[in-house]
Amino acid sequence: MGLLTGKNALIFGLANDKSIAWGIAQAFAREGAKLGFSYAGEMLEKRVKPLAAQLGVDFVEQCDVASDEQIAAVAEKAKAHFGEIDILVHSIGFANKDELQGYFYNTSRAGFHLAMDISVFSFVGLARAFQPMLRRGGALLTLTYYGSVKVAPNYNMMGVAKAALEASTRYMAADFGPQGIRVNAISAGPIRTLAAMGVSGFRDMHRNFAEMAPMHEHVTAEDCGNAAVYLCSDMSAHVTGEIHYVDSGYNIMAAPDPKGLKD
Ligand code: NAD
Ligand code: 0WE
């Protein structure tokens, strides 16, 4: 018996086999969950459908989270297909490229709104749409990054959005607590995904990360999958509103260890 046997899990944010959502999907499948996937647009269908087939997933629905109608539609379809939902994973983030370079203060009003809408409100909107079909003992999970807490060069508008996402995690944990639903976030170290590779300076910061982190090792989507199993299973009963770091310990350091001191 797996840690998620008997649970229905919906995963939002699958783009390709590098996605953190894919690491989570594989770990959930291994632990016996019944899965459903949602992806952003038609462009991704040809990538997502084969991945779904690989895990024998037959609920695969398009949903642009910028649209209330599409969120309502996918919730409706999920209810028809699963009846009740135990786990909802939000692995979605987006800002315009202009907002991920230069001075943060140059962020436009429209760019600010877009990043907050897609990266933050969507978690709240999905939680609301799925609330009526969430089963007691269930869990909501999102993905965040340390740029919410400290300044990560170029992360800019996404850092501000992640700060709001983490606060939303706490407020929703308070809202859903009485229903026996937990709400948590994984704060992952840098991983070479589609969203990360389109970013200037990512390579340098990815390399610098492993030097600074106590474990001197990179984080993988598989690591996030295993942490997600914990946070969405009964193994973490009574853990809610937490930002759980999966970052080789990077966030505990105030300065890099002088070379050679500990290795
Ligand atoms: P990814 O590109 O594989 O996933 C991002 C997903 O967001 C894609 O599937 C994309 O289609 C989806 N998305 C964007 N706009 C959308 C919309 N309007 N409607 C629906 N979906 C939309 O990259 P990833 O790195 O796996 O990102 C997943 C999450 O992990 C994001 O929240 C990201 O901020 C977070 N994260 C990533 C890293 C990293 O270094 N890769 C580190 C920490 C946190
Ligand atoms: O959250 C993320 C990725 C966020 C992201 C990336 C893109 C690139 C392409 C959001 N929107 C877009 N829009 C695009 O058009 N990460 C945690 C990965 C990431 O992104 C960075 C990082 C890290 C780490 C951007 C700047 C600096 C560091």
Image (cartoon, rainbow, N blue to C red):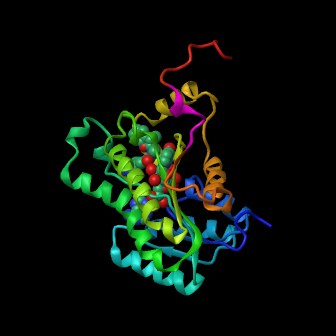
Ligand 2 is found in the corner quadrant, namely top left
User: Can the viewer see residue 194 in this picture?
Assistant: no
**Residue 258 vertical position relative to residue 74 in the rendered view, above or below:** above
Q: Residue at x 36, y 43 (%)?
A: 159
* Image coordinates for residue 261, horizontal then vertical, percent: 63, 12
Name, please, the residue furthest toward the bottom: 80
* Image coordinates for residue 140, horizontal then vertical, percent: 52, 63
Residue 250 covered by magenta stretch: yes
- Is 97 displayed left or right of 79 in the figure? left
* Image coordinates for residue 122, horizontal then vertical, percent: 38, 64
Return the residue nearer the eye: 170 or 116: 170
Q: Residue at x 28, y 57 (%)?
A: 114
Residue 32 covered by magenta stretch: no
Picture quadrant where residue 71 is located: bottom left
Q: Residue at x 61, y 61 (%)?
A: 232
Q: Residue at x 40, y 79 (%)?
A: 72
Picture quadrant where residue 54 is located: bottom right
> Where, quadrant-wise, is the N terminus in this rendering?
bottom right
Return the residue nearer the eye: 161 or 170: 170
Q: Which residues are magenta?
A: 245-253
* Image coordinates for residue 209, horizontal then vertical, percent: 53, 30
